[in-house]
């Protein structure tokens, strides 16, 4: 049997993505990242769904064109079924259902987090089962044990903010634009982690970042009272300190998870996996712990349709289709 040609669609938040894969070979992956939200300092749901409506047809057309295929060649459509913003999810799911009906091909509903975790199968070097995946993004912070493509177990997750939110909120306090994670990363490379912020002592493999956020705020308020230019004079060191605190917490829990499970194939996924400090430190730990580390290329870390298409391939092969009366699920295991 030849590898299935699958169209993937991702509209869970503020990126309109379309991709085409043949089995685990990527043929095209395009994304329109909405910039309407920048002025608001966060994603505005109504603006997001309107922008998805405007972008979904051009993005799908572009993906097909780049892949050199037409609608008639596509054998199945994979779409993000949740979690995410309801208005955004509805645009993708309704479009995918309509297209699957008109083409007479199956539609697969993909869990967004499952897709992040399975994106590794698009890479030449992918982890064998079982592996651990640290899934870190603006909406999620989880350690997932992946025993098979359809057998995922969440070993730990955050009790409050996701680590991407902790990056973004700290960046906002430092006067950096949204989303601030990449700016913290950039300035951290020019600074030293000389400031200490609190680290939550959460039992087991769970996380919490709200105490950290509060400690950054109190620290900055106190320093600015003494010297109003404190942030601008210490921006690089502040970014390095925020970054070190957050990535150390992530990696300590990951080390704990590896010890508990005995699994040494370790993967990163999600937008925060783009962080240079995290990518560097995990490689250092890997040498010490004898880990095999799998880090996806940057466009596979942030939200993308390639991962949806890849997860869709696994479902296509098992014949798991979306029911006709399916309604997307906005929440569930969101962090
Ligand atoms: O996976 P993603 O694109 O969307 C969600 O599903 O949330 O992740 C976006 C998050 C944002 O919080 C952003 O600030 C963070 O990933 N991020 C980074 C970096 N690049 C993106 N955080 C730290 N360092 C980076 N280089
Ligand atoms: Zn995501």
Image (spheres, rainbow, N blue to C red):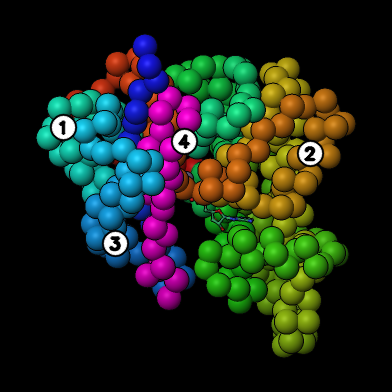
For ligand 1, the image quadrant comes to bottom right
Magenta part of the chain: 17-39
Q: Secondary structure under badge 4? A: strand
Residue 171 coordinates in the image, percent (x, y): 62, 67
Tag 1 residue: 103
Name the quadrant containing residue 92.
top left
Q: CA distance from mark 1 to mark 4?
A: 22 Å
**From the viewer's perspective, is 38 left or right of 182?**
left
Point out the residue furthest to the left here.
Answer: 102
Nearest the camera: 40 or 101?
Answer: 101
Residue 23 coordinates in the image, percent (x, y): 43, 25
Mark in the foreground, 3 or 1: 1
**Which residue is drawn at the image coordinates 67% and 33% (left, top)?**
294
Tag 4 residue: 26
Tag 3 residue: 51
Instruction: Indicate whether 174 appears above or below 301.
Output: below
Please report whichever mark, 4 or 2, sits nearer to the chain's N-terminal start: 4
**Which residue is drawn at the image coordinates 16% and 32% (left, top)?**
103
Instruction: Indicate whether 113 appears above or below 162.
Output: above
Residue 239 coordinates in the image, percent (x, y): 73, 66
Nearest the camera: 98 or 225?
Answer: 98
Q: Residues within 10 Å of mark 4 (few under 14, many from 20)?
A: some
Nearest the camera: 73 or 77?
Answer: 73
Please report whichever mark, 1 or 4, sits nearer to the chain's N-terminal start: 4
In reply to whether residue 207 is colored magenta, the answer given is: no
Q: Residues within 10 Å of mark 1 (few under 14, many from 20)?
A: some
């Amino acid at each position: 049997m030849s590898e299935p040609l699958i169209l993937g669609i991702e509209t869970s938040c503020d990126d309109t993505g379309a991709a085409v894969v043949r089995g685990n070979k990527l043929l095209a992956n395009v994304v329109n990242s909405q910039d309407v939200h920048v002025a608001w300092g966060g994603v505005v749901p109504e603006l997001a769904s309107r922008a998805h409506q405007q972008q979904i047809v051009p993005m799908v057309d572009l993906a097909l064109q780049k892949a050199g295929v037409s609608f008639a060649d596509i054998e199945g459509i994979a779409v993000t079924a949740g979690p995410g913003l309801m208005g955004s999810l509805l645009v993708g799911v309704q479009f995918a259902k309509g297209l699957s009906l008109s083409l007479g091909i199956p539609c697969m509903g993909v869990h967004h987090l499952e897709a992040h975790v399975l994106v590794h199968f698009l890479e030449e070097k992918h982890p064998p089962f079982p592996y651990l995946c640290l899934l870190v993004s603006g909406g999620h912070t989880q350690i997932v044990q992946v025993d098979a493509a359809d057998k995922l177990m969440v070993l730990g997750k955050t009790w409050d903010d996701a680590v991407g939110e902790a990056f973004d909120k700290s960046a906002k306090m430092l006067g950096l634009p949204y989303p601030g994670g990449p700016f913290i990363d950039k300035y951290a490379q020019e600074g030293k982690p000389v400031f200490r912020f609190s680290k939550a002592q959460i039992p087991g493999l769970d996380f919490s970042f709200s105490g950290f956020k509060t400690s950054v705020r109190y620290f900055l308020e106190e320093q600015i009272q003494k010297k109003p230019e404190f942030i601008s004079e210490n921006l690089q060191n502040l970014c390095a300190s925020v970054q070190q605190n957050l990535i150390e917490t992530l990696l300590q829990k990951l080390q704990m998870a590896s010890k508990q499970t005995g699994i040494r194939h370790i993967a990163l996924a999600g937008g925060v996996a783009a962080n240079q400090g995290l990518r560097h430190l995990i490689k250092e730990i890997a040498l010490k712990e004898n880990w095999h580390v799998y880090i996806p290329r940057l466009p596979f870390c942030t939200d993308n349709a390639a991962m949806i298409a890849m997860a869709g391939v696994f479902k296509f092969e098992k014949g798991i289709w979306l029911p006709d009366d399916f309604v997307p699920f906005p929440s569930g295991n969101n962090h």
